[in-house]
Image (spheres, helix red, strand yellow):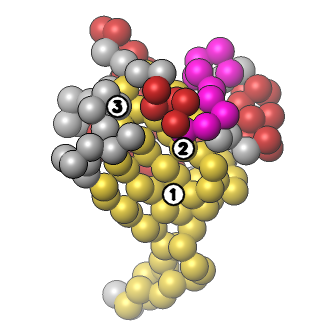
Amino acid sequence: MEHPGNQQDTLQFKEVAVLDKEPLILGGIKMEVTTKQFRNCDLVAVSGRVDSSTAPQLAEALEGVTGSGRYKIVLDMSGLEYMSSAGFRSLLASQRLCKRYNRGEIVLASVPERIQEALELAGFTELFKTYADPIDAVGSF
């Protein structure tokens, strides 16, 4: 549940090529990250595609939360279409930072079936708690 002091930030990342200093948009929005701050945790919702070109922006969004001293994070993946190994590395690095000194952790919510299969193949299911619904995940903190 939200409280009056909730903060929400939305970042949109587009694929861009630089030709003679003029940006050229190669596609629509590839990834969107939205963060909401709750009393006990932060909800980071990611949608679109996380690949080698957008994984740094996902890492930056997670670092924005941890950089403010908040280490309990719910990652809502309901809008996620695809995540590459670069995205998994960003998640793993952020999880290590959150768990250091028992400060918190990243939990996953609404993980699409194909991404869940990839997490299982990579052996990441042992490292992240997974919830069917973001509300349950937020309630776990």
Distance, label 2 to label 1, CA atoms, is: 17 Å
Badge 3: how crowded within 10 Å, few (<14), some, or many (20+)?
A: many
Front residue of 141/76: it is 141
Which secondary structure type mostly characterizes the magenta part of the structure? loop
Q: Which residues are magenta?
A: 125-134
Q: Which residue is mark 1?
A: 54
Q: Which residue is mark 2?
A: 76
Residue 8 lies in magenta, yes or no? no
Mark 3 or 1, closer to the camera: 3
> Cβ–Cβ below 8 Å for labels 2 and 1?
no
Badge 2: how crowded within 10 Å, few (<14), some, or many (20+)?
A: many
Residue 129 lies in magenta, yes or no? yes
Instruction: Please state if 119 lies on the left or on the right of 137 as rendered.
Output: right
> Cβ–Cβ below 8 Å for labels 3 and 1?
no
Residue that lies at the very extreme toward the top in this rendered image: 101
First in sequence: mark 2 vs mark 1: 1
Residue 68 in which image quadrant: top left
Question: Three-letter amino acid code at disc 1?
Answer: Thr
Q: Percent x, y for residue 4?
A: 21, 48
SS for dot 2: strand
